[in-house]
Amino acid sequence: MAFDKIHTDVRAALEKEGWVITQDPYIVPSGGINFRIDLESEKVLAAEKEGEQIAVEVKSLIGASLVYAFYPAFGQYLFYRDALKDEGIDQEVFMAISNISYFRIFRIPFLIRRIKQYNLKFIVVNTTEQKIVKWIK
């Protein structure tokens, strides 16, 4: 399975912020299915604190229609989040998107309502600079 177009940029942006990529891809077996989440990362914190771990699904969201590009990404996100929960893995799942996709998504009221309703979390990346510009929790 091929990586998303912005996968390398998202990975570099996470690493620039001190995240260590621990699995790429991150395979989560659950209910007889092997789910393939793009990245697992761990923030390296001070020695006396426990590290925070996240799962990251990378999405370019390109296509003729943003809504139809978002639709399967939304389903994947929910499946991955549920698979982790079913397996007792206490890990937040983030959808990593470009800043361009972010501005397009957050102009569509229907998508905003679904994002809030299902509590989707995002990492917004400037892919040109390989820099995280926003965390949405």
Image (spheres, rainbow, N blue to C red):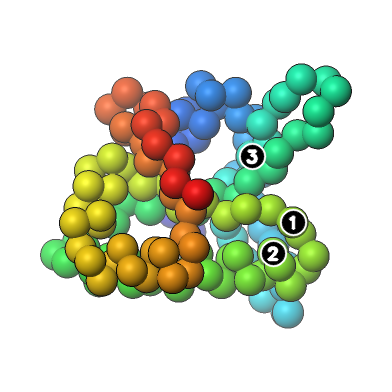
The quarter of the displayed image where residue 22 is located: top right
**Labelled disc at residue 84:** 2
**Is 83 located above or below residue 95 in the figure?**
below
- The residue nearer to you, when weighing 118 against 25, is 118
The image shows residue 24 at horizontal and vertical percentages of: 60, 44
- How far apart marks 2 and 3 lie (CA) works out to 14 Å
Amino acid carrying mark 3 in the image:
Ser
Q: Residue at x 38, y 27 (%)?
A: 130
Q: Position of residue 49 (x, y in %)?
A: 81, 28
Q: Position of residue 84 (x, y in %)?
A: 69, 64
Q: Dot 3 corresponds to which residue?
A: 41
**What SS does tag 1 mark?**
loop
Left/right placement of residue 50 relative to residue 52 reads right
In this view, the mark in front (1 or 2): 1
Which label's residue is closer to the chain start, 2 or 3?
3
For the residues labelled 1 and 3, the Cα–Cα distance comes to 13 Å
- Which residue is the extreme one toward the right? 48
Amino acid on which the number 2 mark rests in the picture:
Leu
